[in-house]
Amino acid sequence: MGTSHETRLKVLVNAFSAREGGGQTYLKSLLEFLRQDESVEVFVLAPDSLELPERKNIHRIRVRWPVENPATRAIWEKVCLARLARRLEADVLFCPGGIVGSRVPRGCKSVTMFENMIPFDRAQRRRYPFGYTRVRNWLLERIMLRSMEKADQIICHSEFSVKVIESNAAGLSRKIVVIPHGIGRRFRSEAARRPEWLSAESYLLYVSTIDVYKAQVEVVQAYALLKQQRHTVEKLIFVGPERSYYGQKVRNEIVRQGLQNEVLLTGPVPPDQLPALYQNARINIFASECENCPNIMLEALASGRPLLVSNRPPMPEFAGDAAIYFDPSNPQELAEKLRLIIDDPVRLAELSTKARERSQLYDWAKLARTTWTVFDAVASCNA
């Protein structure tokens, strides 16, 4: 095929797996900050729910295949993806979902991205009952490692994720580039309007999917202990969709602690309401035990509100000294750290300032510029 990158870089993006918030936010930002000149052309395979920027050099590719189903999508990738890359004369095949599902044609380079950490955390995998999710994560670990071994370039979002890959496959770090995620502009606004459904009461906020590795049960237990230690008028609000059996486990713990009137599970909320939720919280909490790049924590940093964060890596790598850390498996520790700062206006103000300053390190425009530069460098090896 021969590279076309001296005149125009052609990138085929296989984003069929980007069906939820984080994956779609990443791709929207990557494409939004694509340089608008004649030097790059992008072809995108994506679900219809992903809105693409209206640019002359961005093209959506539609396929006549039931790619919504992971199994049939894998078959299509195996049979058709390389053919499509050859027909488009793509210089780079980018698979942000972590799986390169096809051989790439001669002259085309492959780039994958390490996003999903759960398959590589065996302790968290074992917390799921034996069944589909547990087997799927076991398979994903092997499939993702194979894709990374075959890829020409791997994009990671944290130094911690590089260590995880290296511990599973020595030598892969030589083809890894670390590019942290960014923070959307709307999260930096200081005038986000409080949602009408949100009561005027003060609250502690934890935004995240409700799942086994997010430690919402322990956060409920810590909140119960906090109420025993002080006159706590703040409500506790969980925002996010429920996954697996764990949502019911959280609800059972709320009832067991007698906190039905103090703890609110909202489910998912419209994305445009999240900045106001973060900014109006007395304290934001992020208790996840397993992350690659904690997007929610970065958004909370940008709100400029005090932040209590899990001490599991890579959270300290991202938040630095702008957060207070706790063991997410220890409700007593979280309760104690909440108690120490919640009535200390000086400490709360200090944490707020540090959070907003730290958030300036993470920018979607910077991520996009660096990523397109990586694609350019990878394609140059085709010549």
Image (tube, grey):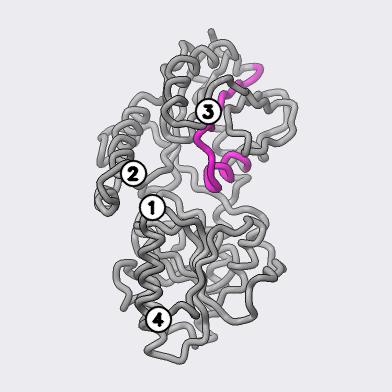
Tell me what residue is drawn at x 29 percent, y 51 percent: 128
Q: Mark 1 — residue? A: 244
Q: Nearer the viewer, mark 4 or mark 3?
A: 4
Tell me which amino acid carries mark 3. Answer: Asn
Q: Mark 2 — residue? A: 133
Is 283 situated left or right of 230 in this image? right
Mark sitting earlier along the chain (1/3): 3
Task: Kindly give the residue lying farthest to the top in the view shown.
Answer: 1
Q: Residues within 10 Å of mark 2 (few under 14, many from 20)?
A: few
Is 126 situated left or right of 383 in this image? left
Mark sitting earlier along the chain (3/2): 3
- Which span is picked out in magenta? 7-28
Q: Mark 3 — residue? A: 14
**How far apart, in angstroms, are the residues tagged by discs 4 and 3?**
48 Å
C-beta proximity under 8 Å, tags 3 and 2: no
- Residue 16 is inside the magenta segment: yes
Q: Mark 4 — residue? A: 258
Q: Nearer the viewer, mark 3 or mark 2?
A: 2
- Residue 225 is inside the magenta segment: no
Tell me which amino acid carries mark 4. Answer: Gly
Q: Residues within 10 Å of mark 3 (few under 14, many from 20)?
A: many
**How far apart, in angstroms, are the residues tagged by discs 3 and 2?**
23 Å
C-beta proximity under 8 Å, tags 4 and 2: no
Mark sitting earlier along the chain (1/2): 2
